[in-house]
Image: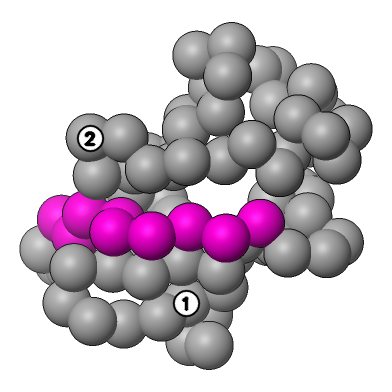
Amino acid sequence: MQDLLDVTAVKPIKDHWLALSFENGENRLFDVKPLLTKKPFEPLQQWHVFEQAYVLAGTVNWPGNIDIAPETLYERSVAA
């Protein structure tokens, strides 16, 4: 079982990927595309919304009260 790791930095990159930094120093890449057709993530299909990603309370958030749990971001991401 992976300890819960906070996200410390996020950078939206082309093709709806997130470049993430975690508190353990790891940098990872997360593909958001599989979520884009599901609620509440549909607005993220638009780049001008997607690129507004920010870190709050240890995870990635977007305007409109959209977020992804940090454990999901870690478990479904790949090493950068």
Closer to the chain start, of discs 2 and 1, is 1
Image mark count: 2
Q: Could you tell me the amino acid type at mark 1?
A: Arg
As rendered, which of 57 and 72 lies closer to the eye? 57
What residue would you read off at disc 1?
A: 28
Which of the 4 image quarters holds residue 64?
A: top right
Q: Is residue 61 left or right of residue 71?
A: right
* Residue 14: assigned label: none
**Magenta stretch bounds:** 4-12
In this view, 74 is above or below 28: above
Asked whether the viewer can see residue 46, the reply is yes
Which of the 4 image quarters holds residue 13?
A: bottom right
Asked whether the viewer can see residue 44, the reply is no
Outermost residue toward the bottom in this view: 80
Circle 2: element type: loop
What residue would you read off at disc 2?
A: 57
- How is the structure coloured here? one colour
- Asked if residue 19 lies in the magenta stretch, the reply is no
Q: Is residue 79 left or right of residue 63?
A: left
Dot 2: within a 10 Å radius of its alpha carbon, few (fewer than 14), some, or many (20 or more) residues?
Answer: few
Q: Is residue 70 left or right of residue 78?
A: left
Can you give x and y, in whole percent of width and height, for residue 33 in the image? 79, 50
Q: At 79% from the left edge and 23% from the top edge, which residue is drawn?
A: 42
Can you give x and y, in whole percent of width and height, for residue 60 in the image? 44, 42
Q: At 19% from the left edge and 60% from the top edge, which residue is drawn?
A: 5
Can you give x and y, in whole percent of width and height, for residue 28 in the image? 47, 77
